[in-house]
């Protein structure tokens, strides 16, 4: 009986050892896959970083080009002594009953009352550039 018990224990121990070996192999495969995944993610990240860097360089160049074009336009406007208002501003003021020739501060503020702060600032800036406001 004891021999049978020992044989049963040996069989159980052998099965446990085989299961442990299989688990070790599975862990090794999982580690290899994880390393491959990390390598792939690293390559993808580097590719994305390079593409984003390239897009950033192009965008910065475009911004610099637009800023330069804007500075040239403003310089031309100042040197040409622009004394006209954009059509949209003149039309908006006319709808509010404000004569462009002689704008009073109160009438201008009343006319611009429905606009947002940014829009009011933009309109006043255009009026100042046109020489209508002092």
Image: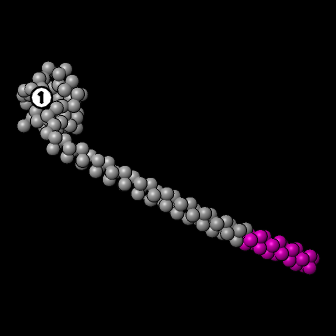
| Rendered location of residue 77, percent (x, y) | 19, 41
Residue 16 visible in the displayed image: no
State the quadrant of the C terminus. top left
Q: Choose between 29 and 11: the one closer to the eye.
A: 29
In the displayed structure, 95 sits above or below 134; it is above
Whether 30 is drawn above or below 5: the answer is above
Residue 125: x and y in percent read 16, 38
Residue 50 picture location, percent across and down: 49, 61
Which residue is depicted at the point 20% across and 37% down? 122
Taking the spot 60% from the left edge, 63% from the top edge, the residue there is 40
| Relative to 50, 85 lies left or right | left
Image-based side of 71 in relation to 79, left or right:
right
Colour setup of the view: one colour
Residue drawn at the location 10% of the way across and 33% of the way down: 132
Q: Is residue 22 magenta?
A: yes
Q: Nearer the viewer, residue 23 or 42?
A: 42
Question: Which residue occupies the foreground of this view, 101 or 25?
Answer: 101
Question: In the orientation shown, which residue stands out farthest toward the front?
Answer: 80
Judged left or right of residue 36, residue 71 is: left
Task: Decide whether residue 99 is among the magenta residues.
Answer: no
Residue 11 lies, in percent from the top left, at: 87, 74
Q: Which residues are magenta?
A: 1-25
Where, by quadrant of the figure, is residue 56 drawn? bottom left
Q: Is residue 95 above or below residue 118?
A: above
Horizontally, residue 112 falls left or right of residue 2, namely left
Is 58 above or below relative to 9?
A: above
Name the image quarter holding residue 6: bottom right
Quarter that holds the N terminus: bottom right
Reading the image, the residue beneath label 1 is 108
């Amino acid at each position: 009986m004891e021999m049978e018990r020992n044989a049963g224990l040996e069989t159980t121990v052998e099965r446990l050892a085989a299961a442990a070996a299989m688990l070790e192999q599975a862990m090794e495969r999982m580690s290899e896959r994880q390393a491959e995944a990390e390598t792939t993610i690293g390559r993808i990240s580097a590719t994305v970083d390079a593409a984003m860097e390239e897009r950033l360089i192009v965008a910065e160049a475009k911004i610099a080009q637009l800023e330069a074009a804007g500075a040239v336009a403003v310089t031309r406007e100042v040197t040409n002594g622009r004394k006209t208002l954009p059509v949209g501003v003149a039309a908006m003021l006319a709808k509010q009953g404000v004569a462009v020739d002689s704008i009073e501060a109160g009438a201008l503020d009343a006319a611009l009352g429905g606009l947002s702060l940014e829009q009011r600032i933009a309109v006043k800036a255009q009026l100042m550039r046109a020489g209508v406001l002092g």
